[in-house]
Amino acid sequence: MRKSATNLGIYGRRNILGASMLALSASLIANGAMAQEAAPAAGEVVIVTGIRKGLQDSVNAKRVSTQIGDGVNAEDIGKLPDVSIAESIARLPGIAAQRTNGRAQSLSVRGLGPDYTVTTLNGREQVSTNDNRSVEFDQYPSELINAVFVYKTPNASMVNQGVAGTADLQTVRPLTFGRRVFAVSARREQNSEDAAIGGYENFGNRFSATYIDTFMDGTVGVALGFAHTTSPYQATKDEPWGDGNLASQNGAFLPGGQKNQVQSSNLKRDGLMGVLEFRPNDRLHITIDGYHSDFKEIQQIARLEYPLAWGGATLASGVLSSDGKFYNSGTFTGVKVIVENYANRRTSQIDEIGFNLNYDISDNWSVAIDANSQRLSRTDLILETTAGTGPNGVGANDTVNFLRGANNSYTITGALDYTSFDNIFLTDPKGWGGSAGRAGYVKNPTIDDELSAIRLSATRTIESSLLDSVTFGFNQTTHTKSKVNREGAITLPGLVSQAQVPAAYRRGTTDASFLGNGKGMIAYDALGLYDSGYYGFSAFTGDNDKKNWSVDETIQTAYIMANIDTEFAGMPVTGNVGLQYVHSDQSATSAFVSGVGGSRYVTDGADYSDTLPSINLNFEVAENLKVRLGAATTIARPRMDDLSTGTGYGVTLNTGVPSIFQGSPRYWSGGGGNAQLRPWKSNSFDISVEKYFGRRGYISAALFYKDITSFIYSATVLKDYTGAPLPAYCYDAGGAQILSGGVWICSMANTNRIGTTGGQTNGSAGYINGMELALSLPFEMITPALDGFGLIASASFNNSSINPTGTGEVAIPGLSEQIINTTIYYEKHGFSARLSNRYRGDFVGEVPDYTNSLQTRNVRSESILDAQLGYTFQSGPANGLNLSFSASNITNEPFFMYQGDNVVREEKYGATYMFGASYRF
């Protein structure tokens, strides 16, 4: 029997290019134009670091893998190719990143957004700082991650898998690393834009240290890593009122309102990683690993909000476009501008510990146990403080000019001076709050997320011409996540209508030229003022209970997988075939809120099973030429907020007209979560052709097709409201039934409790398909004169047709029809240089709204250009010292959201520059 290499799983490869360059390179390969790389001399030991190490590991891993996937490896201790994990992953074929606050934070794999991908650390599912399941990658320092591998096809032993794929983050394994090293790095980070808010800087620092060693004749290994980051970022945001819609007056469009803002922020994160390995002999291997992260982010926002056509201002004059459809310019009078100093603060902590034991009972049997426990806590403070010339329309009004620009956006220019603390007061300028003494609003949600899992497995080696071994196992995961929301108005002392900013919290003025005012606006420490207890608090008494929820899940997975190692028609064939049986028990507790009638908490849920077959086959059709086939049924669990969001409901009185749904009158209606949702589900088919050349070169082409058999979408469905209390408007103040003509006005609703609810439901959908082209080309393989130069490239093309209702297609969040990545590099004699670009086409993104909840928005295509330079001393007293410089988002590419032809919001973050040094002892 021929013994095959096992799937190494976690190795890297960055990608990138245009299809024409791929085709040219393929032609050169086919014509035999490549020179062979020089092999090391006999007995020579070569330790490769830098770009070539990452590529070499990547190509080797892809070559021996039994699954279709792509990865990225550290180029040296504590050094992924990019400063961000998400940016490194986003250079892989078929993967794109979405930016949040300028950082690549979430990923789309093969056109499917973050909800469809599972992220693991050392093979274990991770808790998440957001309200759902998708991991926010800025919680994981890149300096502590040794490698990432994205599995695009699953096997049956992967108990954590998504419809799109599984992204596995890997920390270093000291016994595999096999030698002592102590590595430190320090970097200075600076944003190209000056800090817009007083008290903030546009520079920060990153520091990391890693220690790896082995003891007791190589039987014990230890790895420790620490990473500290303070990262500033600046942002400008231009956001018209109307969510892409414009006001209309005299038959022509004009701005309904505008809110422009500048933002200065700082992210602080401390991460700690530890690994202890024990391998006393060839049979026993024990690994204990832990991870801890402390994360704090503060955003300070200065904004001028202009209520124009929709805010009661008067259009004094205007100039129409030639077609008469738009006001190209004009002037509003009577504009009551709101001066806004906002602050957002997020703190989170992650703690995780894992244990893994592998033991070979005999030459044919081995057993394994893996257990882990994780806990996450997150607290947000979302603070809005308002100021102006006076309360509720009192005080001076502004005169505002507007000028139409690209994408039907408008440039706003005001005239009043907002820089005087004597004339600009803490207040509610437009009276929007409707309560005495109001001067803003605050939201204070908290998230707790706990997960524990245990996995038992056994493997039997088989002497067979078809199979190498059979593995079977069982995994149980228990997951609990909850959200508690606190929100309400903040009020001035004594409920006065206006007050001056206390002197201790004044921060001078903010440049408001971007905000439409050349004079400026007052700046003050809104967060410090709130934390001091200056403001009172008036709790929101509406449907806030709907925002409180908890979800409990117990997922049990049994699996069996046969590892294939055989020949077919003279070709070596490897792979696996297997089956998972997944039993899910889920429940959600959330509030039923009847408007003015109070609320009660209800627990609902579902118990169901899924059977998930999978197969991977790898044919070595010629030397260094592989064809891979994969087929599987996969699932991705529903979003937490879809399962758990509380339900708001009401009833139709006897005197009203009930809605007709499915042929019957419905007296109850509502909207909210659905605790009985089933997962997204797909039957997936993949084929990949890969040609390898040398140690760092390959070209590949892959096709995939996903038949989406279960899709989660918004719909109106029937709901049983038995047990739900009738709203308060069915009773008088004393609790007696209100009668009309001697009949209780809610008697029909009380009798007919099958009503409707709007929310998420499951349905069959359609398909997603695509093609991925990838290339890694060291130029010395074309001619020795280009030794050191190289190209990494990929181009991906995605398409979907999702129509769950039969009435029209829906967009899938995260799907870009085109994703093209290119990297050109040079590395030789200690010098290294890299220029990278990642492009993604238009897509539907999920972006935080003012409550930090996610909302879907159309996002315009973007092209992000990055560069890196470095030099490593290779001899002398500085041997091992590396100096580096990097620039990210060099062209200050905007993050642009749109609706039709109109802008929804445009954000710019500036470029980020980083200079640093690292040293290995």
Image (cartoon, rainbow, N blue to C red):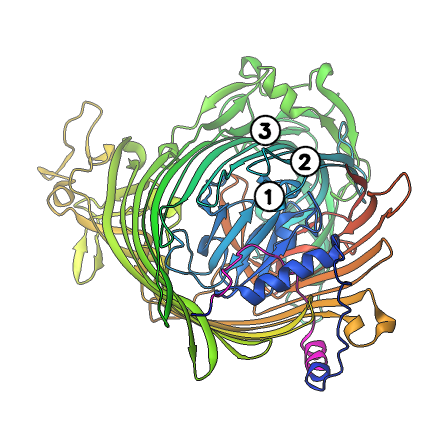
Residue 98 lies in what quarter of the image? bottom right
Mark closest to the chain's N terminus, 2 or 1:
1
Residue 268's mark? none
Q: Are marks 2 and 1 in contact (CB under 8 Å)?
A: yes
First to last magenta residue range: 3-26
Judging from the image, what secondary structure is the residue with disc 1 in? loop
212 with respect to 887 (left or right): left
Q: Amino acid at mark 1?
A: Val
Q: Residue furthest right?
A: 876
Q: Does the segment drawn in magenta span residue 374?
A: no
Measuring 25% from the left and 37% from the top, which residue is drawn there? 603
Measuring 60% from the left and 42% from the top, which residue is drawn there? 138
User: Which residue is under mark 3?
Assistant: 428
Q: Residues within 10 Å of mark 1 (few under 14, many from 20)?
A: many
Q: Residue furthest top?
A: 494
Of 433 and 210, nearer the camera is 210
| 309 in relation to 795, above or below | above
Mark closest to the chain's N terminus, 3 or 2:
2
70 with respect to 666 (left or right): right
Q: Residues within 10 Å of mark 3 (few under 14, many from 20)?
A: many
Q: Amino acid at mark 2?
A: Thr
Q: CA distance from mark 2 to mark 1?
A: 10 Å
Of 762 and 858, nearer the camera is 762
Residue 210's mark? 2
Q: Mark 3 or mark 1: which is in front?
A: 1
Q: In this rendering, does residue 562 appear at all?
A: yes
